[in-house]
Amino acid sequence: MSEDMMVQDLLTLIPEAALALSAVLGLVLGSFLPRDRQWPVRLLAAAGAVTAIVLTVKVWNDPAETVFDGSYSIDVGTHAVRVTVAASLLILLALSLPGTRSTARESEFIVLLTLTGVGTILLAGATDLLILISAYLLAGIPLYALTGFGKDALSTEAALKFYLFGALFGTTMLFGAVLVLGAGGATAYPMLMRTAATAPRAALGIGAVAVLGGLLFKAGAVPAHFWVPDVTQGTRPEVAALVTTVPKLGAVVAIYRLAAEVLDAGDLDWRILIAVIAAATMTLGNFAAFFQTDVRRLLGYSTISQVGYLLVGVAAASRSALALGGVLLYLAAYALTNLGAFAVVCALPRLRTLTDYTGLLRARPGLLVALVVCLLGLVGTPPTGVFLGKLTVFTAAFDAGLAWLVVIAVLNAVASVFYYLRWIIPALKGHADLPASAPIPRVTAYLAAMGSIVVGLLAGPLLDAVEASPLAH
């Protein structure tokens, strides 16, 4: 690669660089600022996120391409994750303000949050197994630290479980990459697409499944989902919002790339595997949520079920024109809606169980409206964005000949109404002297709920934008 090509490739990564630079500068700046006045670090992180969004929108319609000898893709999948992750970081910066403002470790929290976002974007754009593993680590290691940020018994236990599972699946992922390298003679997807057809199917298949296992852990899907409810319940609510939202954005797109490019080229029957995982994930997530009384644990299982619906769209990759657009729209809508639900939890952090929310209608009617919109949005109620996302991925799966999976998904979506109503109904009844709500998370909940509806109303133009170009090869 010539020097000019290297410079040109680096310029395509300016959105990622903006976030990474804000993290590095924030770490340095936080070292010199007084421990109780570190708000410039938060402002710097917000500026990096806004810059990433603006620069991505500017190049959205540019032709898809791979850079650094085919190891990273700049295409609609990467663009969508860039924008969604950056917007999610802005929301999380607001949600974390009450709990971290003017504390001794405020800058560290913000830097770790930003680095997680960078790793997630790299995970989505990676088209080389080595880049994929590096992004897996960058998106994961800061999360382990953030999970234990509260330094209490619950968060410490959650962080330990999270780390141990992450190490296990990270090692499995690395083992899979070695097998794929041995079978296909390369780690870059473009090269594997040319060699996979003649590679030993057993070695390639086992290696691909091992790599897939690491990505399923990051997404929180079966059989790598065990950590999700414990981490969601044990850590701080703003960290739970991060863990159940941002990593999934990059992981789902990474699974889509691996399946549509490497596994398809290897003539592996991967589609039925993804479909079975999707069915198991949505069913287990929903039925486990039925019996939860802790709102954070309920949302943890809810996020598992949402990954199952997303994998329905992944199973239709390469067989339906709606698959990619549906998955990307669903990811954006899910991120906004899930963060909105957690914003209500962050606004009332002392309320832990479903019955604690009794009387919310009379005490905090605005928060109740936001909660209802977000919870029913997660069900897939029109006109929210998740409804259009689910409708699109279900249609894509039907077009791909996976009607049985669509039936299971629809039944699960209907069944999920039950446990969301278990939260909503007590909030509509009775009187209670509820604690004061945190103002910034409260406003964030309002905005997220409105945003969920706006995404649904603008679903047509958004689908047109993400369907304008395919993934880069």
Image (cartoon, helix red, strand yellow):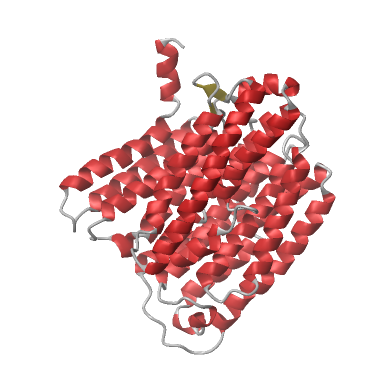
For this view, does 6 lie left or right of residue 295?
left
Viewer-side residue, 418 vs 374: 418
Viewer-side residue, 94 vs 111: 111
For this view, does 390 lie left or right of residue 165?
right
For this view, does 266 lie left or right of residue 101?
right
Q: Is residue 34 above or below residue 358?
A: above
Q: Is residue 442 visible?
A: no
Return the x and y of residue 100 as percentages of the image width and height: 30, 60
Q: Examine the image and state in which quarter residue 306 appears.
A: bottom right
Q: Is residue 129 visible?
A: yes
Return the x and y of residue 369 as percentages of the image width and height: 53, 72
Image quadrant occupied by the C terminus? top right
Residue at x 76% of width, y 33% of height: 268
Return the x and y of residue 110 as percentages of the image width and height: 33, 50
Viewer-side residue, 234 vs 244: 234
For this view, does 472 lie left or right of residue 408?
left
Return the x and y of residue 178 as percentages of the image width and height: 58, 29
Residue at x 49% of width, y 30% of height: 59
Residue at x 34% of width, y 63% of height: 150
* Residue farthest to the top, as pictured: 2
